Structure formats: structure tokens, C-alpha cells
Image (spheres, rainbow, N blue to C red):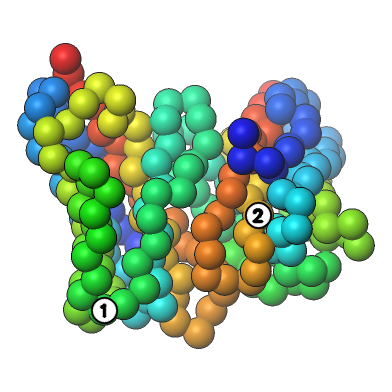
Amino acid sequence: GQQVMQIPQYQHVQEGEDFTTYCNSSTTLSNIQWYKQRPGGHPVFLIQLVKSGEVKKQKRLTFQFGEAKKNSSLHITATQTTDVGTYFCAGIPSGTYKYIFGTGTRLKVLA
Amino acid sequence: DSGVTQTPKHLITATGQRVTLRCSPRSGDLSVYWYQQSLDQGLQFLIQYYNGEERAKGNILERFSAQQFPDLHSELNLSSLELGDSALYFCASSVEGSPGELFFGEGSRLTVL
């Protein structure tokens, strides 16, 4: 079946360090989205990438969509304690309407 | 506040029982999605409805069923409950079928004892 894997599963960083999570799909995606879920909360949309090789930035966050549209990454520069949470990618396999969520990366930031 | 309302917020029931979870999407959103999140796990896609019709189905058990009503609210029915069904069930809505931002509700936490 269609799977979207994320690595790492967990990441602990010192405040101020950078953080990257990687998302890999077993099938080509029509687009990919990223969500953040704070502890005890619900997923909140961050961004959507549609084009092959697309790069988008939101302040300290940089998102990339791979050339083959099967992988993506989220990079956070100079993490802050407010970045704590689980980051999920969600891909829509080409030809479907399903949003398949990745396994998530739980980020802890140590002050 | 995402504008998506889920009820109940918490539900405790026994094995073998049946429960119904309700979701009201954001005003104007035609699509409703249901996801299951077990403890510290990812989001498992269950099913999607668009304007009253089933559009996509994920790993939804035969004991589970859902529907979207003419007023666009949706219900997820879980029957013959098992301990393993204990999870957080999220509803999300979007304006169109896809692609588009998903707006998630606060979730319904189901505990099966």
C-alpha cells in the first residue's frame, strides 16, 4: 500500500540548534503538505508544496519538495522552545484524493 | 479555533459497544476526512466524504462506518468495539476535494475498557 515514512522518529535539540525532518513516499505525490501538532493538540497546517523541486520559506522554516515528487524535507533554523511538537508531512498520491500522513517526527527543544 | 467542531470530546465505553462520533465542518467546506491517531502514533486515514458522497477510503475497519449528511456534518460509527480501538479520532475539513489545507477539529478521545 501507499506509505509515507518520516525520519527521524524523535529528535532532541538544544535551543538554538537546527533541526531537519525528512519525508519519503513509496509513490509519486501530486503535492505534499506539512502540519505541526503541539502536545495535546490537533494538527495545524503549515504549508503546501506542489511543484517538483519547489522550495518555500516561512521565517525560520524551509520546506523542500524533491525533484521526483517522492520526498520532502522541513528544516528549522535556530530552534526555539515554541517549536516543540510533532511535525507531519502529508502527501496526496497522484491520481487519488487521499491525504496520507507520514509517521511524524517528534521534536523536543531543550532550553 | 479551526472552525471544525467534534463531539463528544471524550468518551469511555466498554468492549462490544457501539459509539457515534460527530463532526461539523467549517462553514462552506464540502469535504470531511476522518483520521485515527493511537497513542503517540501517526494519523491513519480512515475515510473521506465530499458533498455527501464517499470519495476515498483508507484503512477503515468493516466494524466502522461513516456518512456525510445533506447539511455536510459527518458521523463516524464504531461498533463491536475492541480495546485496540482506543484512540483519538480527528475530523478534518477542506473547501474542495483536494488539494487544499486541512482544518482539524480538536478530536474525540475514545477509551474502550
Q: Is residue A45 visible?
A: yes
For residue B4, what is the image quadrant? top right
Distance between mark 2 and mark 1 Cα atoms: 26 Å
Q: In this view, does A12 lie to the left or right of A40?
A: left
Residue A12, horizontal then vertical, whole percent: 17, 28
- The amino acid on which the numbered mark 1 sits, given as a three-letter code, is Ser
Seen as rendered, the residue at the extreme bottom is A95
Left or right position of A81 against B23: left
Name the residue tied to disc 1. Answer: A52
* Residue at left offset 72%, top offset 49%: B26
Residue A13, position as x, y percentages in the image:
13, 28
Same chain for the residues under marks 2 and 1 in the image = no
Q: Nearer the viewer, residue A98 or B36?
A: A98
Rendered view: B97 above or below A11: below
Q: Furthest-top residue in view? A: A111
Q: Image quarter for residue A26?
A: bottom left
**Callouts 2 and 1 close, C-beta under 8 Å:** no
Quadrant location of the N terminus of chain A? bottom left
